[in-house]
Image (spheres, helix red, strand yellow):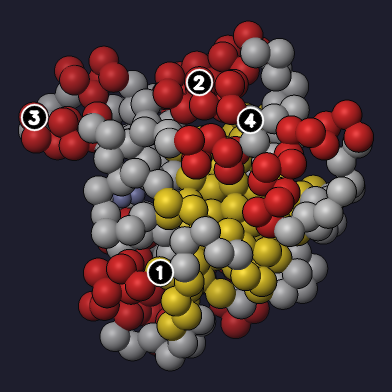
Amino acid sequence: MTLKVCVLASGSRGNCIYIATATSRILIDAGISGRETIRRLNLLGVSVEEIDAILVGHEHIDHTRGLPALTGRHGLPVYLNRATADAAAGQLSKARSIKIFTNGQSWEIGDLTILPFSVFHDAQDPVGFVVRKGSYIITVVTDLGMPTRLVKERLKGARLVILEANHDPDLLMNGKRPWSLKQRIKSSQGHLSNAAAAALLAEETGNFLTDVFLAHISRDCNRPEYARQVVMKRLRKAGKGGVRVRLTYQDRISEVVEVNDEPFSDSKIRDVVPLARQLGLNF
Ligand SMILES: [Zn+2]
Ligand SMILES: [Zn+2]
């Protein structure tokens, strides 16, 4: 095993992703309580002390709820950009180690390279993340109203993508939610629909892609298995029927994906070049 990925929780009541190599372990977002994060890590045989860092994409509570306990009592270092740190100041008041990153600039945590990139969402300065181990690239982008050119670029070289498939437009518009909330979700700074996620995966990923987790699935305005069918159908149409598409859950951990970071074959390299340059990968 060189990389292990598990979505510990996903949805509007809390998000948390675990990515680990043999020597480095990180969380992306800490949106469930500290206690629940620890319990779910324990299910993987991991103790909280073994986590090297928490990366935070934006300040909304479903991404920061666990920060007081995890960064305070347990002392985990937290990485976020300046605007997010300011907006999440209340959640960080007990933090022992706050590290500020700049969007678009990569850095290392052990043998993982991290590259944060801007996304469109109704937060101060929201980001998605590329996480690289060797030539294995994971792209995580879970709160975005619309895919920008930058988001598409960051998907190109990924072998594993964690992408939101938030809602079905009909379920959203027919649901009981207030009109203002429906507008927010649908807006360019809200969340992606199943069809929008499916199109992104089909059209913008390269031929390296093997695994997808569908994240931030709305409880009221979506059906998880339906979301998966929409995405798989679109991928098949694009000749990517071999991609494994997994669901993520609010109340329990996802399947665990374990992968090796074997180098790319020559024929696939051209797809990854733009991203590789950003990440300092040499081919
Ligand atoms: Zn959000
Ligand atoms: Zn969210």
For residue 199, the mark is: 2
Q: Is ligand 1 less than 8 Å from the beta carbon at label 3? A: no
Badge 2 element: helix
Q: Nearer the viewer, mark 1 or mark 3?
A: 1
Question: Mark 3, residues whose alpha carbon is within 10 Å: few (<14), some, or many (≥20)?
Answer: few
Question: Mark 4, residues whose alpha carbon is within 10 Å: few (<14), some, or many (≥20)?
Answer: many
| Residue type marked 3 | Trp
Badge 3 element: helix
Dot 1 or dot 3: first in sequence order is 1
Q: Nearer the viewer, mark 1 or mark 2?
A: 1
The residue that label 4 is drawn on is 205
Dot 1 or dot 2: first in sequence order is 1
Badge 1 element: strand
Question: Mark 2, residues whose alpha carbon is within 10 Å: few (<14), some, or many (≥20)?
Answer: some
Q: CA distance from mark 1 to mark 3?
A: 32 Å
Q: Nearer the viewer, mark 4 or mark 3?
A: 4
Q: CA distance from mark 1 to mark 2?
A: 29 Å
For residue 81, the mark is: 1
Lateral position of residue 2 relative to residue 168, left or right: right
